[in-house]
């Protein structure tokens, strides 16, 4: 069930993109997803993130009210982009990061969550001219689940490799990529997914490749009628460098002069040097990423013997 807030309280149309609220069932309660412009006004409340904050209605919030029309009893839920919440009857865990949608589970305690990103710019900070690539990370028992939903450009043609198998040089084809970095050691994991079913997983350190063509459980499906594709991969925990704290994601398609390089966290326009081209290994532009946001605060990253 999805709702859009398209009017002010007195029925005037809003002058910005509408706030989106989606409600879906969960075993422990109701999943409430909020997508909204971030106005950053007023400033962040002084309360601790993840904790209730009385008077939250005086800050930037999205609210939902659930009413029994016969008894006139109702639940009020207020959610703040600065990771605070207020509710009249239950605890709600929520989070917000740049580039992510809010994902919250209404329940008595914090549960695991999913995080969603949309790639809306090219590598050099120009807005993309098509529906953005969506990447969702979700918890899995054997690793991190990565879901990709994207337009299918069918350019370049299909790689020569077998679907479901690693393919070296996949970055020269149509791919969506995710990088997971330990910023202290500069060790990072690169995962490339292709709509035709090929994949490439590399472990790198300071730009040097340590291991490549690691096996991966990955399934991709192309909807030829709609011109879209969807892929799901399970990235084993042992592939991740210890202490992952930053990430970036990319999407590539097209050939020749039409080759397009897109980035979740691009290089700012004012920092681009003359003659500079796309480089997805500029680790300084990666942004904060915490696996506990997905797996839960009590979760600890499993140890890995594949890193020095």
Image (tube, helix red, strand yellow):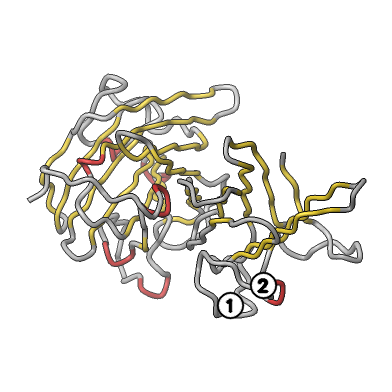
Does the residue at mark 1 contact the one at mark 2 (Cβ under 8 Å)? yes
Which residue is at 57% across, 48% downward? 105
Helix, strand or loop status at disc 1: loop
Residue 78 drawn above or below residue 73: below
Q: CA separation, marks 1 and 2? A: 8 Å
Residue projecting furthest to the top: 162
Which residue is at 64% across, 59% downward? 36
| Image spot of residue 238 (x, y percent) | 20, 40
Residue projecting furthest to the left: 308
Query: Is the N terminus in the top left, top right, bottom left or bottom right quadrant?
Result: top right
Q: Is residue 196 left or right of residue 142?
A: right
| Image spot of residue 237 (x, y percent) | 25, 41
Q: Is residue 36 left or right of residue 235?
A: right
Can you tell which quarter of the image residue 168 is in?
Answer: top left
In this view, the residue in front, 212 or 151, is 212
Q: Is residue 296 left or right of residue 164?
A: right
Which residue is at 61% across, 44% downward? 31
Q: Which residue is mark 1?
A: 45
Mark sitting on residue 56? 2
Can you tell which quarter of the image residue 58 is in?
Answer: bottom right
In this view, the residue in front, 200 or 46, is 46
| Image spot of residue 86 (x, y percent) | 65, 65
| Image spot of residue 300 (x, y percent) | 28, 51
Can you tell which quarter of the image residue 199 is in?
Answer: top left
């Amino acid at each position: 069930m999805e709702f859009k807030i398209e009017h002010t309280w007195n029925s005037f149309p809003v002058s910005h993109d509408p706030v989106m609220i989606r409600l879906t069932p969960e075993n422990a309660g109701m999943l409430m997803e909020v997508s909204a412009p971030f106005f950053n006004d007023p400033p962040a409340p002084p309360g601790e993130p993840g904790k209730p904050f009385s008077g939250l209605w005086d800050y930037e919030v999205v609210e939902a009210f659930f009413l029994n029309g016969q008894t006139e009893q109702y639940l009020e839920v207020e959610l703040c982009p600065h990771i605070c919440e207020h509710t009249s009857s239950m605890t709600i865990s929520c989070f917000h990061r740049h580039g992510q949608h809010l994902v919250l589970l209404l329940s008595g305690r914090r549960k695991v969550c999913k995080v969603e990103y949309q790639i809306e710019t090219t590598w050099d900070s120009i807005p993309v001219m098509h529906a953005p690539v969506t990447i969702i990370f979700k918890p899995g028992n054997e690793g991190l689940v990565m879901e990709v939903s994207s337009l299918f450009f069918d350019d370049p043609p299909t790689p020569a490799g077998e679907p479901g198998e690693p393919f070296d040089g996949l970055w020269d084809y149509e791919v969506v990529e995710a990088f997971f970095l330990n910023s202290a050691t500069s060790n990072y994991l690169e995962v490339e997914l292709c709509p035709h079913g090929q994949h490439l997983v590399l472990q790198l350190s300071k730009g040097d490749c340590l291991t490549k063509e690691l096996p991966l459980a990955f399934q991709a499906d192309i909807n030829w009628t709609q011109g879209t594709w969807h892929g799901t991969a399970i990235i084993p925990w042992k592939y991740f460098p210890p202490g992952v704290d930053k990430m970036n994601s990319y999407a590539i398609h097209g050939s020749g002069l039409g080759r397009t390089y897109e980035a979740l966290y691009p290089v700012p326009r004012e920092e681009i040097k003359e003659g500079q081209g796309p480089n997805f290994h500029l680790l300084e532009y990666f942004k904060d990423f915490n696996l506990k946001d997905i797996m839960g605060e009590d979760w600890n990253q499993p140890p890995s013997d594949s890193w020095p």
